[in-house]
Image (tube, rainbow, N blue to C red):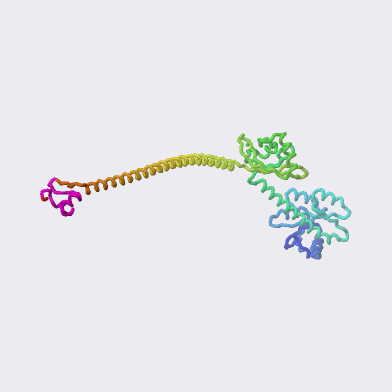
Amino acid sequence: MNSCLSPNPLKILLVEDSEHNLPAFIRAFSLNGYKAEISQSASAEDALELLGCEFIKFDALVTNYKLPGMSGLELFTKLRNTDNILPVIMLIPFGSEDFAVEALKDGVDDYIIKDRDQKYLKLLPFVVNSVIRNITAQKNTLDALRLMQYSVDQASEMIMWGNSEGQFTYVNNKTCDTLGYTKEELLNKFIWDVDEDFSPESYIKYWIKMGLMDQDRFETVYWRKDGTRFPVDISVSQGVFEGKKLNFVFARDISERKQMEEDLQKVNEELEVRVTERTEELAMTVNMLQEAVTMLQKEITERIKSEEALMQSQEALNNSSKEMYDLYNHAPCGYHSLDENGSIVRINDTELNWLGYSRDEIVGVKKFTDL
């Protein structure tokens, strides 16, 4: 079975003043495997009234060219004046092919010549289905293009098209809002009116350069209408649209990024200064520590020498004391020392030997008068 654009039956409005033709139309669709719901209006005026009802929708309109009162072509014209894009197939009387040419010129989607043997009825379902498919495909394409156009118009970045003379041929809403111009104002301006890096002469050179490149990217500065300036990142590609070569420009305001870069640069510079200052402080500290270590090493060396000299002096003193003690104890004559009470507190060996006492029996025990 032939398929339509949807599993639902085709809803067709037939504008035909002869009610006897409706069964033949229904039978033609059924015999060719198409599901169809066909309604009939006897005049163009009735058809317009029916089409104006918002609760009734049709997939296609099939109308005679010749009708009582308003003609089929006049019906088509009135529909298009109401922005109704319902597909229209015109039934042209046999021998009136000039009507077909007129209908096509006025924009009718297709036509069928009504031959006397009604063979056109076999062709009608295929023509209607084909027209519906084509119109639906065109509508889908137009809807996609409208959506794409809307997305470009509402994009968050500036989008511009420029021709070989440098004049803008398209600007989106973001471009107008950012630069402070209306769309009409910008479409009468040139790229060098907003880009400080371009002039008429330099743009010609750039246009030639872009012809040799797939795309380009650079940074520049734009002017707003109020004279303020701001940095932008630019991406450019060149292509052909409707036979005309254009530059397609995408621009992004990078003021915040530049400010962040400046802030980061300032932080880096401050950090470098702090690092330099800290390095100098550390160098001074290291020098002071080295001087302190040197002084401490010198002091330790001098202390070691002093201790060595002191030890040598102590040793010499000990030796001298020992010699004096030996001289005292072994002198050829007796020696003794008395305290204030006349008690013997010291006595040499020579005198002990003379007296016949031990040291413990004399020292601190006897007085000189006891001997």
Q: Is residue 299 magenta?
A: no
Q: Position of residue 136 (x, y in %)?
A: 74, 55
Residue closer to the observer: 47 or 245:
245
Label tally: 0
Is residue 347 found left or right of 295 in the rendered image?
A: left
- Between residues 260 and 281, which one lies in front from this camera angle? 281
The answer to which of 186 and 320 lies nearer the viewer is: 320
Residue 95 placement (x, y as % from top left):
89, 54
Compared with 322, 132 (above or below) is below
Residue 214 percent coordinates (x, y): 73, 45
Camera-nearest residue between 5 and 128: 5
Residue 97 against residue 122 in the figure, above or below: above
Left or right side of 113 for 297 = left
* 143 on left or right of 130: left
Choose top left, top right, bottom left or bottom right for residue 263.
top right
Q: On the picture, is 365 further left or further right than 216?
A: left
Tell which residue pokes out farthest to the front in this image.
332
Quadrant, the N terminus? bottom right
Q: Which residues are magenta?
A: 340-369
Give x and y (percent) for residue 337.
Answer: 17, 46
